[in-house]
Amino acid sequence: MSNFKGLAHIGLYTQDIEKSKDFYINNLNFKLDYETISPKPNNAWLKIAFISLNGMVIELLEPSDKSLAKQGNAGSVDHIAIEVKNLDELVSQLKAKGIEFETEKPIKLEKLFNGAQVIFFRGPSGERLELFEFLA
């Protein structure tokens, strides 16, 4: 499938998004590209910040429920995002192969990177994968 273009970003859980932004920006020279707070059911929320450096993009994720931001020796990776083109076509092809997605259709994110759309699914070991398409 030639629709795959490369790694779009890596999602990294954090218990303190401000501390993580400070570390990456002030120590490693990343820049802040975008941030938001996404409301979740039951008054929960997810703080999101995209930071980048020389083509590397990290999505920092701070959940209101800090137990979701597990800590380990190397941190907690939430998902691997793969940049694609023709996402709708690719989703149809993968569904035909039996892949089940978290949502029925890709989610459009109008304000992220001047427009993007995403959809998530699981790999064979339960790893969470995201197909990510820039719209602009």
Image (spheres, rainbow, N blue to C red):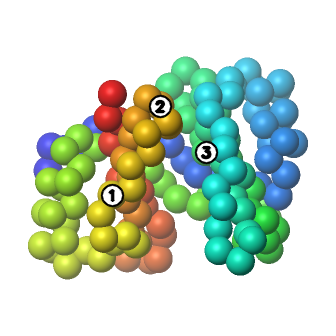
Label 3 vs 2, first from the N-terminus: 3
Q: Residues within 10 Å of mark 2 (few under 14, many from 20)?
A: few
Circle 2 residue: 113
- How far apart marks 1 and 3 lie (CA) works out to 18 Å
Q: Amino acid at mark 2?
A: Phe
Q: Is residue 132 visible?
A: no
Q: Amino acid at mark 3?
A: Glu
Circle 3 residue: 59
* Of marks 3 and 2, the one in the foreground: 2
Residue 7 located left or right of residue 92:
right
Label 1 vs 3, first from the N-terminus: 3
Who is closer to the viewer here, 97 or 46? 46
Q: Amino acid at mark 1?
A: Pro
Q: Secondary structure at mark 1?
A: loop
114 versus 78 height, above or below: above
Residue drawn at (61%, 28%), measured in percent from left and top? 33
Quarter location, residue 26: top right
